[in-house]
Amino acid sequence: MAQRFNYDSLFSKTSQDAPPGSFRHAKYDFAVAYPDPEILPLDELVDSLKSAFDREGRDLAYYSDAAGYAELRRLVAEKLARERNMKVEADGLVLTSGSGEAIGIVIQALTDPGDVVLTEEFVYLGTLNQMRRYGADVVGVKCDDDGILPGDLDTVITEQTAKGKKVKYLYTIPTFQNPMGWTMTLERRKQVLEVTGKHGIPVFEDDCYADLRFEGEDVTSFHSLDETGRVVYVGSFSKIIAPGMRMGYLVAPQEVINRAWSFKSGGAVSQFTALAVAEYMKGGMDQHIEAHNRALAAKRDAMLAALGENFGSSVTWTAPQGGLYLWVKFPEGADLAAVQDQVYEEGVGYYNGAQFSPSGEGANYVRLCFGHPSAETIYEGIGELARILDKKGVFPG
């Protein structure tokens, strides 16, 4: 039998051992932010695709514009102007394979190993992992219910600069923040822009949850408040149509797009998907978002009620006006990280707070997603979570 070839001496120094995996689902899955499969607009997407194919389907014989389908870019620019107060031309944005690709190529374009990158004190673990992959020194900034604390932001930048560190940018999810759920107030956004402007630092705004508001008033984007080109912006259709369609977009000064694009592989996004999304935007997408958000509100309320009934005053939690997450704080000393895998094996999935922390703190927090399961399943699952945690003696004392 021939000896198997060994690649060990051939791998690049920057490669990592990261085998492609598959998502596992607990019976009660509160970990990953999936939408409810029962409310996906499947028939509408099929109809949209049929209409688009009848009109221009034969264009699939050609490679599309590198920046992505021009008609979809035009529609996105109009949506951003209408809903996020952003003055963007279709030529000033590019389509990406979900917001994750946009975030990844911007991180690579702006980050050298050892650079300091600022985030909220807890931040989306996908972005946190990408920053670490490319060698960033990620530093979290304290927050309250209104968002990043400007005084703490100023202090962190000053301290890092005094150490001889290069602070490259602030990455923020200001609307229905992942995982904490709050929305940064308008006044706080202005203060954060003022602090970062004083230090000459750009703001990287991840606005992928902005459409998921079911209560309260919208807060305008960071991008709309800036006239200097200091805000880089990403958005996505994953949370309002379907994650599996992998369609997002990047808005940035042309020089940033050019550098970020040097890290993009595989050419333009899928023209097949872009046709379906563009046609759907012209038809029923707004009505779908409204119905989707009504369903999300009911699920959030079910999770809030279940937490109150099963945990009482022993834990605290947020009550966001939109988005997909509740942020739950257990007593100091409770270690939800240590039992996470065991709880999963018993049927309940969640992510613990330390997974979102640049410093590894927060094991007494959990993020619970309410987007995927039904209200009935949420109610059952929170009860099961309480039972399992009590059995395992998670609560100190």
Image (tube, helix red, strand yellow):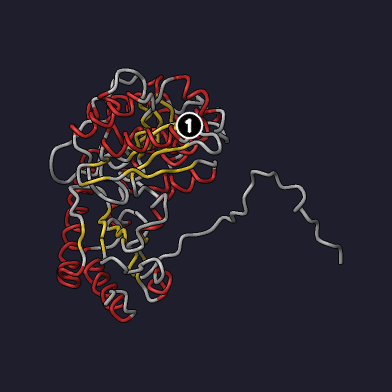
In the figure, 123 relative to 329: above or below?
above
Q: Farthest left residue?
A: 216
In the figure, 260 relative to 289: above or below?
above
Residue 145 screen position, x and y as percent: 20, 46
Between 308 and 212, the one lying in front of the other is: 308
Question: Which quadrant holds residue 299?
Answer: bottom left
Residue 152 screen position, x and y as percent: 29, 39
In the figure, 385 relative to 173: above or below?
below
Which residue sits at x=29%, y=60%?
368
Q: In this view, does 251 lie to the left or right of 377?
A: right
Check disc 1 and report its element: helix, strand or loop: loop
Residue 182 screen position, x and y as percent: 23, 46
Q: Farthest right residue?
A: 1
Residue ID for mark 1 = 166
Which residue sits at x=52%, y=25%?
259
Question: Which quadrant holds residue 190?
Answer: top left
Which residue sits at x=32%, y=64%?
364
Residue 303 screen position, x and y as percent: 20, 63
Mark 1 neighbour class, 10 Å CA radius: few under 14, some 14 to 19, many 20 or more: some
Question: Which quadrant holds residue 315?
Answer: bottom left
Between 53 and 308, the one lying in front of the other is: 308
Which residue sits at x=21%, y=59%?
317
- Residue type highlighted by circle 1: Lys
